[in-house]
Image: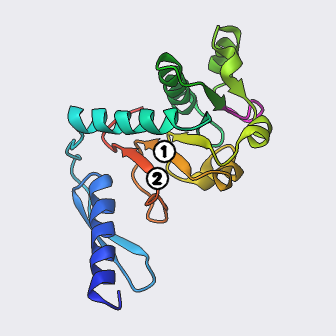
Amino acid sequence: GETIKQAEKLARKALDTALSRGGDQAAVVNENGEYTFFGGVSKSADTKNRIKSRLWASQLLHMARNCSRVFVIGHKYSDFDSFASSCGIAYACDFTGVKANIVIDEKTTLAQPLLGDFLKSEYGELVISPSDALRNCDENSMLILCDTHLISGCDCPELFDKTDHIAIIDHHRLNSGAHIDNYLFAHNPNASS
């Protein structure tokens, strides 16, 4: 950065990125904003704890209750863990009285067997297409992105232009190009699918 304040902000972002990638490496930001990582060969230490999870869940629920509608969406070519995590979040919202829809492209999902069974269940009506979500999403809606932190890598990135109420839940190592600063972000790279 050109100033101490800018350098501190970049250093904190590099530290947060290194910690969210497992905490066993160093991240250095060059003048172009690109990261170089050093280390990362040991098993990651789990820094997530119950208190942090509960606080995050409380924030998520508070945010969802203050929005008109919730859309839960996973990554493109959704696999079993992407679709299942979306189902779990939608069910948790429903359990607490918040209506949520699962946005999934039924033509491109890799979780077709699971999706087929889900559509036949009592929760099948929660599933909507990306085009239906685009028609119904507005500035008072909330989006919850599951199993990825890359908005460009989800089934309907255009949804994220419609609202600022966004939460991200992911367990993959952070991509250095991820823009997550303004979102409610739950991340645990030590959690498995």
Q: Residue 17 in the image: x percent, y percent?
A: 33, 61
In this rendering, the answer to whether 112 lies above or below 77 is: above
Q: In the structure shown, which secondary structural element does the residue marked by tag 2 occupy?
A: loop
Q: Do the residues under discs 2 and 1 have CB atoms within 8 angstroms? A: yes
Which kind of residue does numbered mark 1 sit on?
A: Ala
Q: Residue at x 22, y 41 (%)?
A: 46
Q: Residue 43 in the image: x percent, y percent?
A: 22, 46
The colour mode here is: rainbow
Q: For residue 133, which quarter of the picture?
A: top right
Q: Residue 186 in the image: x percent, y percent?
A: 38, 43
Image quarter in which the N terminus is found: bottom left
In this rendering, the answer to whether 77 lies above or below 97 is: below
Using a 10 Å C-alpha cutoff, classify the residue at mark 2 as few (fewer than 14 neighbours), some (14 to 19) or many (20 or more): few
Nearest the viewer among 21 and 138 is 138
Using a 10 Å C-alpha cutoff, classify the residue at mark 1 as few (fewer than 14 neighbours), some (14 to 19) or many (20 or more): many
Give yes or no for residue 170 being in the magenta stretch: no
Nearest the viewer among 108 and 103 is 103
Question: In the rendered structure, which disc, 2 or 1, sits on the residue that comes first in sequence?
Answer: 1
Q: Residue at x 58, y 38 (%)?
A: 74
Q: Which mark is residue 167?
A: 1
Which kind of residue does numbered mark 2 sit on?
A: Tyr
Q: Residue at x 78, y 32 (%)?
A: 107
Q: Residue 172 in the image: x percent, y percent?
A: 42, 46
Image quarter in which the C terminus is found: top left
Q: CA distance from mark 2 to mark 1?
A: 6 Å
Residue stretch in magenta: 103-109
Residue labelled with disc 2: 183
